[in-house]
Image (spheres, rainbow, N blue to C red):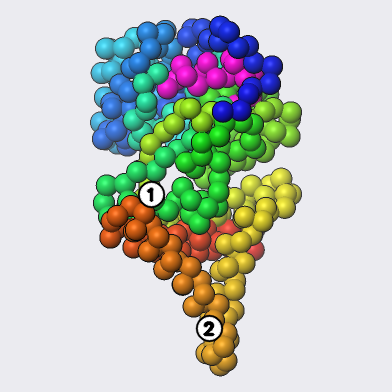
Amino acid sequence: MDSIPGATTDPLPRADPRTVLAAIPTLNEEAHIEACIRSLLSGDDRLADVQIIVADGGSTDRTVEIVRELGAEFPNVSLVENPKRLQSAGVNRVADAASEAVEYLVRCDAHSVYPAGFIIQVADALVRTKAGSVVVCMDAVGVSCFQKANAWIVDTPLGSGGSAHRGGTRSGFYDHGHHAGFELDHFRQIGGYDESFSHNEDAEYDHRLVRAGGKIWLDADIRLSYFPRSTVLALGKQYYAYGRGRARNLIKHKSRPRLRQLVPVINLLGLAVTGLLALIFPVFASYPVFYGGVLLAASVFVAVRHRSLCGLLAGLASGIMHITWAAGFLRQWIFR
């Protein structure tokens, strides 16, 4: 693990739980919200003094009822309305509701079950590093065959493009990661999340934070398990939205795409052009065949590595990620 510049070493500073607030945006999460909240309240005695606020976007199921029942059991759990419905707006709503004593804001997702002491670990990392934001690593896991293949490929360079927070093992300062915690003053000073973003609001926020002089610490010792999409259609919709969100971010800030963001776009354009030309000149079919071969090789590699025939779907999952992300990116970039 990298050393933390300026961090106290012994004893490690810890967050005062009375200065910590956790935000959970919800919308029809009755199947997950109770397990989520109970997991967040386990693992550290200090959690009894941490405020947890659920920002509900107008659920029509039992989400609100379940949260109120939990609020009766745990006095530190409360509920606010999120009329704008989006997760970004929900986190902003909780930040606005914070008392003057709150210094640290932790973002939690309702459909997740968290490791013991997660909120306190994130808050302690914010205190130790004095960073404007703490991000964490995500480890994909699967249940169904396609979901397993998706999980096995997404945390590789062929899946996520080598993002540090996707299965990474090295702590350090980065320019982006899976959002976990914020120094609340920083969060407010740069205006919180841009509520016009339904996807990629985290990367958009990180861009503004770094530009304002804030630092982002990736703590590889705090890890989350997550379940990726389990069907082809759901995965395609997800990555199409991701591509659009990334393009919106670049357009808003007049930034240039990075090489790893351009690769799937160039690949999609190459497949389209060579595919059409191959109808007249068969030699141009070499590129689609090459790309298909890469995906096939990835499938075989994953299947052998994990000793499962489910791994043979890894190339399919990877190709869906590449093509739909690039399609969403191009759509947003062209039709601004």
Q: In whole angstroms, how far apart are the C-alphas of marks 1 and 2? A: 30 Å
In-front residue for pair 314/266: 314
* Residue beneath disc 1: 151
Q: Say left or right for 311 vs 5.
A: left
How packed mark 1 is, by other alpha carbons closer than 10 Å (few <14, some 14-19, many 20 or more), is: many
Q: In this view of the protein, can residue 290 be seen by the observer? A: yes
Q: Give the range drawn in magenta.
A: 118-133
User: Residue 32: percent from the left, percent from the top?
Assistant: 29, 33
Residue 186's image quarter? top right
Relative vertical location of residue 292 with respect to residue 124 in this rendering, above or below: below
In-front residue for pair 116/61: 116
Give residue 318's mark: none
How packed mark 2 is, by other alpha carbons closer than 10 Å (few <14, some 14-19, many 20 or more), is: some
Q: In this view of the protein, can residue 185 be seen by the observer? A: no
Residue 300's image quarter? bottom left
Q: Quadrant of the C terminus?
A: bottom right
Q: Which amino acid does label 2 sit on?
A: Ala
User: Residue 40: percent from the left, percent from the top?
Assistant: 36, 21
**Residue 128 is covered by the magenta coloring:** yes
Q: Quadrant of the N terminus?
A: top right
In-front residue for pair 191/34: 34
* Residue beneath disc 2: 285
User: Which residue lies at the image location 51% right of the left edge and 7% below the top edge?
Assistant: 16
In-front residue for pair 55/15: 15
